[in-house]
Amino acid sequence: MAQALPFILAGVSVGSKIFGGIQAKKTAEQQAQLNEAQARLASSEANREAGRKTEESRKFLARQKMSFLANGVGLGGSAGFVLEDTAAQFQQEIDAIRKSGAARAGFLNKEADISRSTGRASLVSGVLEGITSGAKSYAMFN
């Protein structure tokens, strides 16, 4: 039994290093999934906000048109330019909201990719450390 003890301890050491690598990969995968869920949420929130802003724009432009018409101002000429400018400003805000959401989602998806890559590296590292540790123990006791 005394002769087997070093090999048993080496096996435990090898197993713990491999197990540590497996657990690190699982943790990284969970983090990646969380980041992807947050990316979907960021995209969804941006689209919802852009939709609200689009509706706000539609209502504001309708009120602006009605105000012009109620005051006897035609929608051509200067009033038409004002309406176009207002619509363009709203569209810039809507585009900015969408771009911001896409950028946030892209960042979170990239974080997910990095987490997965780190997890794979940890798994490989754990396996290699386990093999190296086992080989050293084998060499030391033979």
Image (cartoon, grey):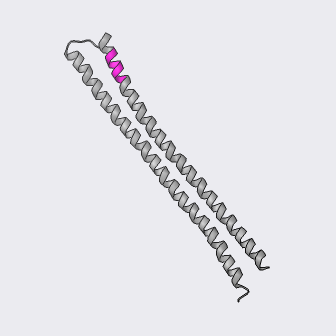
Q: Based on the displayed image, in which of its 4 quarters is residue 73 positioned?
A: top left
The furthest residue to the right: 142
The furthest residue to the top: 77
Does residue 70 show up magenta in the picture? Answer: no
Rendered position, 90 above or below 120: above
Residue at x 50% of width, y 54% of height: 33
The furthest residue to the front: 140
The image position of residue 32, as x and y in percent, is 52, 54
Residue 58 in sight from this viewpoint: yes
Q: Based on the displayed image, in which of its 4 quarters is residue 29 positioned?
A: bottom right
Q: 69 or 137, which lies in front?
A: 137
Q: Based on the displayed image, in which of its 4 quarters is residue 92 positioned?
A: top left
The image position of residue 77, as x and y in percent, is 32, 10
| Segment colored magenta | 81-87
Residue 76 in sight from this viewpoint: no
The furthest residue to the left: 71
Main SS type for the magenta part?
A: helix
- Residue 7 in the figure: left or right of residue 103: right
The image position of residue 58, as x and y in percent, is 31, 28
- Residue 53 in the figure: left or right of residue 102: left
The image position of residue 135, as x and y in percent, is 75, 71
Rendered position, 53 above or below 18: above
Rendered position, 116 above or below 45: below
Assign the C terminus to one quadrant of the image.
bottom right
How many numbered marks, from 0 up? 0
